[in-house]
Amino acid sequence: MAGKYTEIVGIVAPSSAVAGQKVNIEVRIKNTYSASIGIMAGGALEYGVTPWPTIDYPSYQANVAAGATHTFYGSFTMPDSDVTIHAYSYWYGSDGAWHFDDDKTKDIDVAELVPEFSQFEISNYSRR
């Protein structure tokens, strides 16, 4: 369900990641207002740790044209347990304040590191 002036239309992230791996995400937020407005992305990881680690957004706010969707790019380091990305959107009001508007979640499972063998070669063998 959309907020008053924004709608998080998607969170793009892998369904699983290895603990310690950098996980890149995209949060796509649409301006549903009839004019250009300032939109800000926020977010945290939910996995039982207090305080929740935040998502690193190198650029977390933008002026977005009416009806347009802006993609905010972020990342975090995968912990050693499953996480839920909780993304938030805010709009900038004429009162000079940011207002919470919409939120959406996406789950990421922790994955085991599985070694890959793409080529196996015996270079020296002697029978004794």
Image (spheres, rainbow, N blue to C red):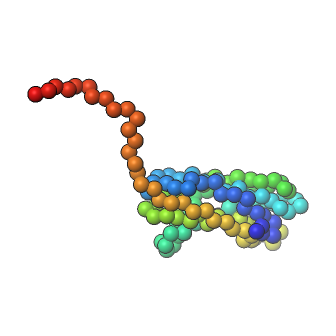
Q: Residue at 26% of width from left, 25% of height from top?
A: 123
For image coordinates 78% across by 64% down, the residue present is: 6
- Nearest the viewer among 56 and 80 is 80
For residue 48, side relative to residue 126 (left or right): right
Residue 127, by quadrant, is top left
Taking the spot 57% from the left edge, 58% from the top edge, the residue there is 56
Q: Tell me the quarter of the picture where residue 108 sits.
A: bottom right
Residue 109, compared with residue 47, is above or below; it is above
Q: In this view, does 121 lie above or below 60?
A: above
Residue 98 appears in the picture as rendered = no
Give the position of the N terminus as an image quadrant: bottom right
Q: Which residue is drawn at 56% across and 56% down?
A: 15
Q: Does 102 sit left or right of 44 as displayed? A: right
> In the current view of this chain or complex, which residue is farthest to the front?
127
Quarter of the picture containing the C terminus is top left
Occupied quadrant, residue 107: bottom right
Q: Where is residue 83 in the image (x, y as percent from the top left)?
A: 52, 64
Residue 42 x, y percent position in the rendering: 65, 64
Compared across the picture, whether 127 is left or right of 110 comes to left
Q: Residue 66: percent from the left, percent from the top?
A: 85, 56
Whether residue 72 is visible here, answered yes or no, is: yes
